[in-house]
Image (cartoon, helix red, strand yellow):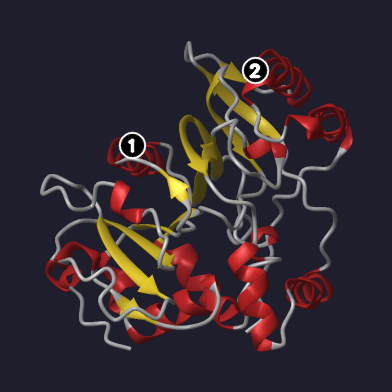
Amino acid sequence: MDTETKSSTSTRRNLVIVRAGDNSLHRGWGADVSECEFDLIVSYYGTDPSSFLQPYENRVDYKGGKWDGIHALLDQRPDLLDRYQYIWFPDDDLEADRATIEAMFVKMRRLDLHIAQPALTLDSYFSHLPFLRCKSFEFRLVDKIEIMAPCMRADVAAKMLPLFKKSMSGFGLDFLWTRLAAQNLGRSAVFDALPVRHTRPVGIHLATAMLKSGRTADAEYRQLALQYGFSEFFPLSYGAVDRKGRRWRSRLMIGLRMVADYLADRGDFRQAFRLKKLLWRLLRRQWSKPLEISQIVLES
């Protein structure tokens, strides 16, 4: 794998690493613009030797899953973890633009976050309802960040790196990376005002790749769950700032506002048939589920 990329000479402090197949959408993200404030590395798992060879793409090749591919890159290029302050790890089927991505990095620094993610547009394919954009809020503080598009501080990525090596799917990693510090309150967020669109059903490439490898996402999850004692994965919104700059601290009131917003915009949902059941579940979890932000010490 050739990892001598153009980013080696960059002075930017933001990096985007995308695990890309032949239908990757990263060329719409604006990394080709000279004023762009982030570098891009395309970790390519496809088979076309002529794909993604523009200088700004910094293509490297690695077969396999998302997270073991990211491990392979960062293990061979540990200098990337020193050079960049924040790294975004998006799936390749996200529609996004340069302004959104750059604003995400700005907010990471301004809020001193360890890890965060953009919200998903309502017409996105999704796994977890609370990660969809809630129009009342600028951002919400959450206790979990999903594997689709986490943006993390480089030291968080460095701590997680040994676990990336063992994971194609990322299942279970999302229980851990919001809980690595001694104090995790207020350190992870979803940016409602900075949504991106997830364009394809969840997990199609992953299932195919894992089937060929003889591994399963469920097995990877069970191994980590046994090791660290996971409960149900459900992201709780325990704080928020709304579009008028007001702070919200009541989990129940945040949940009620989320339900109201989602109901008001239910016609925009791609998967609206799921909504009624998911809204009731969201409200119950916001009211009763314990917050999970206590520190987890990763085993060496």
Is 138 above or below relative to 54?
A: above
Quick check: 207 left or right of 117?
A: right
Q: Position of residue 35 (x, y in %)?
A: 12, 44
Mark sitting on residue 181: none
Q: Position of residue 299 (x, y in %)?
A: 67, 80
Amino acid of disc 2: Asp
Q: Quadrant of the C terminus?
A: bottom right
**Could you tell me which residue is drawn at 27 percent across and 82 percent down?**
3
Q: Which numbered disc flags the more N-terminal residue, 1 or 2?
A: 1
Q: Nearer the viewer, residue 253 or 5?
A: 5
Residue receiving disc 2: 265
Callout 1 crowding tier (Cα within 10 Å): few <14, some 14–19, many ≥20: some
Which element is circle 1 on? helix
Residue 296 location, quadrant? bottom right
Residue receiving disc 1: 103
Quick check: 20 left or right of 263?
A: left
Q: Position of residue 192 (x, y in %)?
A: 52, 30
Is 250 above or below relative to 168?
A: above
Q: Position of residue 182 (x, y in %)?
A: 61, 57
Residue 268 location, quadrant? top right
Which element is circle 2 on? loop
Residue 76 location, quadrant? bottom left
**Could you tell me which residue is drawn at 74 percent across and 77 percent down?**
216
Q: Quadrant of the N terminus?
A: bottom left
Amino acid of disc 1: Ala
Measured in 3D between alpha carbons, the distance from the residue under mark 1 to the one under mark 2, in whole angstroms, is 25 Å
Is 284 above or below relative to 35?
A: above
Q: Nearer the viewer, residue 146 or 212?
A: 212
Q: Are marks 1 and 2 in contact (CB under 8 Å)?
A: no
